[in-house]
Image: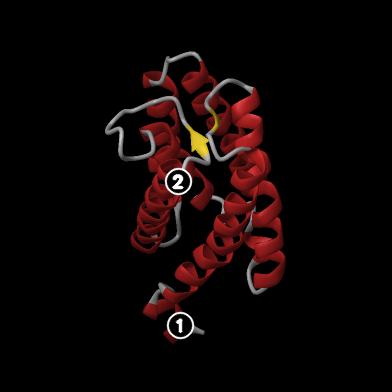
Amino acid sequence: MAKLWNFVLFQAGWFACVLGAANHQLFWPITGTLAYIAFHVWRSPSPKAEFSLLLKALVFGIVADSLIMYLGCVDFGDAWPSPFLSPLWMWTLWVLVATTINSSLSWLRGRPILAAVLGAISGPLSYEAGIRLGAGGWGPRGQITGFILLSLVWAIAVPLFFYWDRASIKPSLVKNL
């Protein structure tokens, strides 16, 4: 049941942030999504390891989206906190995605090729959906280039998040196995 709630709350957070960005009303969507993320970490069997995973995903997402934006593939339409970085609402979404690694996407654990394929397909489609809802636009390089670059980013991101999670397995759990 927890996996279902994780999926539902992930979708709710995604829609809240994307629609908030589209309507320039981001305070409550980001605040609500961050509250769920904090609750998720608090309820995690290993909060430190979960927080570490979310922090790594955040850094990866900021770098990846900022690079994609800089290369002219995606225009997020929001310059906060800096015109040189992807916007805060996208940072929130990257962390939100990472909350699914040990929950609704846990069935991908140990299946890196499937995780890469899922990332390569669902990542760009998620951006396309956000763009169609008005949260941004394709940059001057166009949709095809954007899709290809996003596919590469997400084909790396999803298996990498599982790797980072596995690499941070709690020593106490390993001893107990």
> Of the numbered discs in the image, which one, if any, rests on residue 71?
2
Is tag 2's residue or tag 1's residue first in the polypeptide sequence? 2
**Label 2: which secondary element:** loop
Visual colour scheme: secondary structure
**Residue 85 seen in render:** yes
Give percent across and percent down for residue 46.
40, 62
Give percent across and percent down for residue 106.
63, 61
Q: Give the vertical position of 18 relative to 140 (above or below).
A: above
Q: Please, what is the three-letter code of the amino acid marked with disc 1? A: Val
Give percent across and percent down for residue 71.
45, 46
Residue found 61% across the figure and 47% down from its top: 145
Q: Residues within 10 Å of mark 2 (few under 14, many from 20)?
A: some
Residue found 47% across the figure and 22% down from its top: 21
Q: Please, what is the three-letter code of the amino acid marked with disc 2? A: Leu
Q: Quarter of the image holding residue 38?
A: top left
Q: Give the vertical position of 65 relative to 129 (above or below).
A: below
Q: CA distance from mark 2 to mark 1?
A: 43 Å
**Residue 35 seen in render:** no
Residue found 65% across the figure and 24% down from its top: 132
Give percent across and percent down for residue 133.
62, 22
Residue matched to label 1: 174
